[in-house]
Image: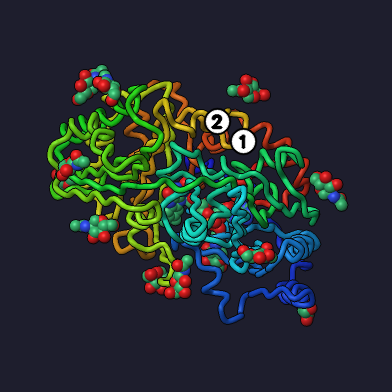
Amino acid sequence: MLFTTFLSLSLACTITISSAQNASEIKEQLALEGIPALIHGDSGYIAASQAYNLRYTVEPIAIAYPTTSEQISTVVITGADQKLNVVARSGGHSYIANGLGGTNGSLVVDLSQMKNITVDLETGNAIIEPGNRLGDVALALNDAGRGLPHGRCTYVGIGGHSGFGGWGFASRMWGMTLDNIISATVVLANGSIVTASEDLNSDLYWAIRGSSASFGIVSSLEFHTHPVPSSATAFEFTWEMDIPTASAAFSAFQSWALNGSSIPPEFGGEIGFLKGQAYGQVEFAFLGNYFGPDDKFNETIAPFFGTLPTPDYANVTQGTWIEALTAIAAGNMNTSTQPDSNDTFYAKSLMAPESVPLTNDSMTALVTYLAEVGYNSSDFWHVEVELYGGSQSVINQIGLNDTAFAHRDTLFTFQPYASSPNLLPPYPDSGFDFVDGMVDSLTSHMPDDWQWGAYPNYIEDRLPDWQTRYYGSHYDHLRVLKAEFDPTDMFRFPTSIEE
Ligand SMILES: Cc1cc2nc3c(=O)[nH]c(=O)nc-3n(C[C@H](O)[C@H](O)[C@H](O)COP(=O)(O)OP(=O)(O)OC[C@H]3O[C@@H](n4cnc5c(N)ncnc54)[C@H](O)[C@@H]3O)c2cc1C
Ligand SMILES: *[C@@H]1O[C@H](CO)[C@@H](O)[C@H](O)[C@H]1NC(C)=O
Ligand SMILES: *[C@@H]1O[C@H](CO)[C@@H](O)[C@H](O)[C@H]1NC(C)=O
Ligand SMILES: *[C@@H]1O[C@H](CO)[C@@H](O)[C@H](O)[C@H]1NC(C)=O
Ligand SMILES: *[C@@H]1O[C@H](CO)[C@@H](O)[C@H](O)[C@H]1NC(C)=O
Ligand SMILES: *[C@@H]1O[C@H](CO)[C@@H](O)[C@H](O)[C@H]1NC(C)=O
Ligand SMILES: *[C@@H]1O[C@H](CO)[C@@H](O)[C@H](O)[C@H]1NC(C)=O
Ligand SMILES: *[C@@H]1O[C@H](CO)[C@@H](O)[C@H](O)[C@H]1NC(C)=O
Ligand SMILES: *[C@@H]1O[C@H](CO)[C@@H](O)[C@H](O)[C@H]1NC(C)=O
Ligand SMILES: *[C@@H]1O[C@H](CO)[C@@H](O)[C@H](O)[C@H]1NC(C)=O
Ligand SMILES: *[C@@H]1O[C@H](CO)[C@@H](O)[C@H](O)[C@H]1NC(C)=O
Ligand SMILES: *[C@@H]1O[C@H](CO)[C@@H](O)[C@H](O)[C@H]1NC(C)=O
Ligand SMILES: *[C@@H]1O[C@H](CO)[C@@H](O)[C@H](O)[C@H]1NC(C)=O
């Protein structure tokens, strides 16, 4: 089943390279318009075509570096003339190298030269170009006393992040990153440059908030931002636990999340599982941010924390908004001070609906799997269990149909993840079954008709029913819009919306 799905995905994406596709010609055409590009043989091409996930080797026909929407339009038209797949790359952190096209021969529109950020001090609205990384965004907004909800990894690009979701510890308070987009400038398949907002091209505005890459190249984003909270807490606790203790802790986390009155929106957090120190054990982690008053932190977490043993490691840091974000970003937010990293991994996602909570059996099964199969594995793995829900979560108060993001009833988003032992290639074959088994341990202890989803920012190309898992009830409408905005399927990659 997995194999056939993977095969049909790859087949659907195979393009025929016609003789018209001449990399040198593309480079020359773009150069005439003042747009630099790298092609095979150029020094810099190999580094520029490196994926974040080194499990992927992808060779684009060319990587272009536009600086304006007009230049992006030129690149798109050049790609159309040559019948190429065209893809945008903002931060390049796609899990399956979709920013490079996911498959060989695409024309990559690299947005790294488009890094402007302008904050309107009257309205607090910010115009952010897609070449910015989350660290750049957080620092620039903070200078104006503003903030956005987004993930905690400094080098993730705002372009991809806001195109498919964007979850962080401020999301229960302010929504997903994409929920804060007021308007966007988008370059369409025919090269037109349009504004997408509630009033202008509202279908496109809907589609780019959940599935942007299939519809165009977003060249600028206008966000509604928020005044930063006056104080913020960053916390991390870890425990070495046996199977019964970790299963009970997991169950207590769910009970806390489901208790309607318990968790204020200012709280954002997750639990995590890592390899334990002995067979039959896991390391259990609880981490996040709290954006309410410092002296309310203990009582906020008490209903859950109070059920747990004394932690082996505890670190609670209180300070400003930006200090709290920095603390959970491994201490660095400034992308100029150290280089980006990379990894060699396979990751999945599972979005568990709030309406059908996890059974104790499913939670115990995952913990047992991690404490036994996980202990035996030499891969470097973890499972994050991110809190999306709880009755006061803004993520779930936004209407299901308001944006293309198809998940407004999520309690937890799981991210099962395993890297090769030294984080470098080759990726061990056993890693695929190992990570698939993490998800299976949960689903096999839930009702057969359990409607779990998958998170399109934790994208994978081995997921059966990916259309429904990622896009749920929105998939059919996305196909209609795809046919309208991209009739030749130019913005194509392994998980793009099908014609
Ligand atoms: C270390 C790490 C930590 C992460 N942490 C979080 C987290 O805390 N929360 C969370 O929600 N996610 C997280 N993610 C997932 C992340 O949100 C996605 O990988 C995201 O899509 C990456 O965006 P990018 O611009 O860096 O990637 P890219 O590879 O550049 O792009 C990803 C996809 O978006 C498309 N795209 C990019 N820019 C544009 C554009 N301007 N217009 C149209 N399409 C575009 C690309 O074509 C590609 O399909 C994390 C990922 C990593 C690697
Ligand atoms: C590709 O384009 C270059 C530059 O225009 C040209 O010199 C070359 O002959 C072309 N190659 C092929 C195989 O068409
Ligand atoms: C791209 O081409 C290279 C070189 O031929 C190959 O090693 C790689 O596997 C190809 N990548 C994909 C995604 O097909
Ligand atoms: C870039 O930002 C600066 C200051 O924030 C602004 O003055 C300028 O107009 C912006 N440039 C573009 C091209 O948006
Ligand atoms: C689930 O496990 C918790 C903690 O181990 C326990 O308190 C609770 O009663 C269990 N629930 C069910 C339905 O068995
Ligand atoms: C639900 O949360 C409230 C507020 O924290 C707490 O008083 C109550 O005991 C909780 N109920 C359960 C069943 O945990
Ligand atoms: C919160 O709890 C920690 C111990 O977990 C304690 O050291 C600290 O003093 C408490 N803070 C407040 C404000 O009660
Ligand atoms: C606690 O976290 C802060 C912020 O990340 C960090 O600077 C500090 O070193 C940590 N302390 C310990 C004891 O780990
Ligand atoms: C990031 O670091 C660079 C180099 O040290 C520095 O010039 C720049 O001002 C820093 N940016 C911010 C936003 O702090
Ligand atoms: C991956 O990252 C490591 C450490 O940051 C670096 O040394 C290495 O050159 C990178 N490899 C590639 C292929 O980018
Ligand atoms: C883990 O490895 C041990 C020692 O080889 C073996 O006895 C045990 O059955 C393995 N456990 C699993 C779940 O594979
Ligand atoms: C969303 O739209 C679908 C299809 O148009 C409709 O069936 C459904 O009731 C709507 N859901 C909500 C929550 O509005
Ligand atoms: C470009 O495509 C859009 C969306 O399909 C369409 O509305 C517009 O008229 C097209 N522009 C041109 C010049 O064909």
The type of residue carrying mark 2 is Ile
**Farthest residue in the front direction?**
122
Q: Position of residue 256 (x, y in %)?
A: 29, 27
Instruction: Name the N-terminal-most of marks 1 and 2.
Output: 2
Residue identified by numbered label 2: 398
Q: Residues within 10 Å of mark 1 (few under 14, many from 20)?
A: many
Q: Residue at x 51, y 47 (%)?
A: 461
Q: Is residue 272 visible?
A: no
In this picture, is 21 found above or below 411?
below
For label 2, the SS is: loop
Camera-side residue of 87 and 187: 187
Q: Secondary structure at mark 1?
A: loop
Residue extending furthest bottom? 43
Residue for badge 1: 403
Left or right: 350 in relation to 252: right
Quadrant holding ligand 3? bottom right
- Residue 490 location in percent, x, y? 72, 53
Residue at horizontal 67%, vertical 57%? 219
Q: Position of residue 373 (x, y in %)?
A: 24, 43
> What amino acid type should be assigned to the residue bearing mark 1?
Thr
In the depicted view, which residue is nearer to us: 115 or 415?
Answer: 115
Say left or right for 298 vs 406.
Answer: left
